[in-house]
């Protein structure tokens, strides 16, 4: 079955996805500011890194609506309000929201798109759903480290990398300050736990 995009459920789902990705980007930008204020510069980078990917997703969804340029679409949707003032809660909220997109929202949007004859759009929903799963796993990994008090501590010797200058130190505890650029501990990340 092939449906005209303007009269399709897919059209509305694209706008919902665009709105959701846009809001996620803004939430993560605000979460980055909270992490920075708490001295967790590595978490600030994590949120900003993910925010840029959410912008890329928003662009993918929005570009599918090009033929509707100049029109106004009315959609309903549900969007989270995540305003805790601590980095751990923000990480857990982000993890939850990313899992919601991966498990529920985008697979459902992909099914509808394919049923309506929009296979490329369906594929984009599926592919971006997989990326959201990666985001959830990454947020969860950092939340686990923070929760266990191991964001800057490891029971075993590990290699710590300064995000500012790249200096590497092998120790159980990330240095209080980088020996090279003098940035604080909050800029250190385990070499084997990258933002990617």
Image (cartoon, rainbow, N blue to C red):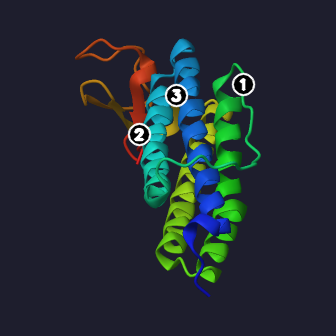
Q: Nearer the viewer, residue 148 or 97?
A: 97
Q: Nearer the viewer, residue 122 or 91?
A: 122
Residue 141 in view, yes or no: no
Under tag 3, what secondary structure?
helix
* Residue at x 57%, y 74% (from the top left corner): 4
* Residue at x 51%, y 58% (from the top left corner): 131
- Alpha carbon distance from label 1 to label 3: 12 Å
Q: Which mark is residue 29?
A: 3
Mark 2 and mark 3 lie on one chain; the one further toward the N terminus is 3
Q: Quadrant of residue 178?
A: top left
Q: Nearer the viewer, residue 66 or 95?
A: 66
Mark 1 and mark 2 lie on one chain; the one further toward the N terminus is 1
Counting from the top left corner in percent of width and height, residue 101 is at 66, 56
Position of residue 48 relative to residue 76, above or below, is: above
Question: Which residue is identified by label 2?
Answer: 158
Mark 1 and mark 3 lie on one chain; the one further toward the N terminus is 3
Q: Quadrant of residue 195?
A: top left
- Alpha carbon distance from label 2 to label 3: 30 Å
Q: Residue furthest front?
A: 70
Q: Quadrant of residue 126?
A: bottom right
* Residue at x 50%, y 17% (from the top left corner): 36
Counting from the top left corner in percent of width and height, residue 114 is at 59, 80
Horizontally, is 151 left or right of 108 in the view? left
Mark 3 closeness class: few <14, some 14–19, many ≥20 residues within 10 Å: many
Question: Which residue is identified by label 1?
Answer: 83
Residue 159 in view, yes or no: yes
Q: Report if the CB atoms under discs 1 and 3 are less than 8 Å apart.
A: no
């Amino acid at each position: 079955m092939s449906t005209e995009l303007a009269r399709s459920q897919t059209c509305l789902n694209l706008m919902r996805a665009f709105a959701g990705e846009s809001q996620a980007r803004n939430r993560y930008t605000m979460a980055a500011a909270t992490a920075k204020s708490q001295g967790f510069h590595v978490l600030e980078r994590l949120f900003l890194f993910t925010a840029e990917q959410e912008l890329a997703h928003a662009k993918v969804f929005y570009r599918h609506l090009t033929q509707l340029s100049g029109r106004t679409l009315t959609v309903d949707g549900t969007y989270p309000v995540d305003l805790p003032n601590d980095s751990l809660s923000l990480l857990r909220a982000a993890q939850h929201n990313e899992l919601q997109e991966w498990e529920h929202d985008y697979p459902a949007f992909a099914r509808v798109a394919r049923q309506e004859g929009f296979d490329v759009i369906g594929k984009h929903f599926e592919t971006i759903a997989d990326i959201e799963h990666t985001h959830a796993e990454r947020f969860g990994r950092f939340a686990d480290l923070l929760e266990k008090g191991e964001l800057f501590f490891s029971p075993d010797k590990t290699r710590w990398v300064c995000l500012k200058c790249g200096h590497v130190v092998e120790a159980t505890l990330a240095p209080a300050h980088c020996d090279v650029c003098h940035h604080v501990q909050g800029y250190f990340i385990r070499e084997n736990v990258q933002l990617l």
